[in-house]
Image (tube, rainbow, N blue to C red):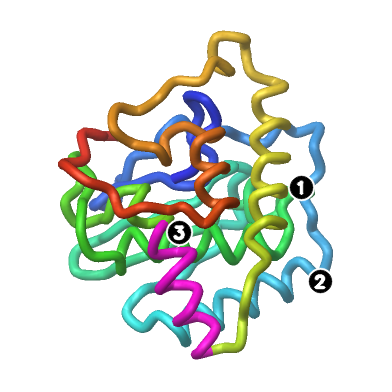
Amino acid sequence: MVHAGNSAIVGMTGSAAGASMLNASVLPNDIALCGSESRDRMLDVLVSEFQTAFDGIEYEIDTQTRIVNAQAFQVGGSRFVRLYGGFAFHPLVNEDVLVFTLLHETGHHRARGRRFAGDPGLACDCLADKWAVGAGAGALRRCTGRSMNLLTAVDSLEAVIASIDARSPAPLRLPHRRHGCWAGFWPTRKSRLCSGNVPAPTGPCRYSY
């Protein structure tokens, strides 16, 4: 998950068909989605590459919604990663942040270690970040040749966060730290990602969506 203040931007978690959405934002109707053929091809290629690199996870693009988010979830014994339309086709979202987001959500399934308090089947956000920029990025590069520019990804994500915060009531834009979770506070998370200082989380995850 990626959080701007108290708003989740990338990532929702759940272990059932009715997986919960955490503070998901919906792209306003006055912002046009990027519906170009090149964006469609980009997403098709990314889904194919991730399916190749990470067997056992199904990747989906939900083109029917304007939700600005992504989700890792389980249904029965199957694992899924889903990009929602408001994020996948957001005009401020570039290819690098799509790669980072898919890696982060894949990390909820693949990373070993601390789990969400609310869903022991999924790795916590801090661990998903660490896996995404380390083992996940390496596996994707080896299997498909795909790499990402992390700084460009972070800049794109921050632009999306700013665009959402600019339309939110003032109280929602106030930064709130999630207890014991550096990934739950965007300024700290951005700093850690950009500096390469992405530590393994310690202690139990107390976050429950």
- The local secondary structure at tag 1 comes to loop
Question: What is the CA distance from the residue labelled 2 to the residue labelled 3?
Answer: 23 Å
Residue 112 locus on image (x, y percent): 23, 65
Q: Answer yes or no: do the residues labelled 1 and 3 have beta carbons within 8 Å?
A: no
Q: In the image, residue 51 lies at what x, y percent?
A: 46, 81
The residue depicted at 43 percent of the width and 55 percent of the height is: 129
Where are the magenta residues, as a range? 130-143
Residue at image mark 1: 92
x%, y% of residue 80? 37, 65
**174, 36: nearer the viewer:** 174
SS under mark 2: helix
Which residue is label 3 attached to? 104
Mark 3: give few (<14), some (14-19) or many (20+) Cα within 10 Å.
many
- Closest to the camera, between mark 1 and mark 3, is 3
The local crowd at label 2, few if under 14, some if 14 to 19, many if 20 or more residues have their Cα within 10 Å, is few
In three-dimensional space, the C-alpha distance between marks 1 and 2, rounded to whole angstroms, equals 15 Å
Q: Earlier in the sequence, mark 1 or mark 2?
A: 2
Among the 4 quarters of the image, the one containing residue 25: top right
| Residue 42 higher or lower than 158, as above or below | below
Callouts 1 and 2 close, C-beta under 8 Å: no
Main SS of residues in magenta: helix
Q: Amino acid at mark 2?
A: Ser
Q: Quadrant of the C terminus?
A: top left
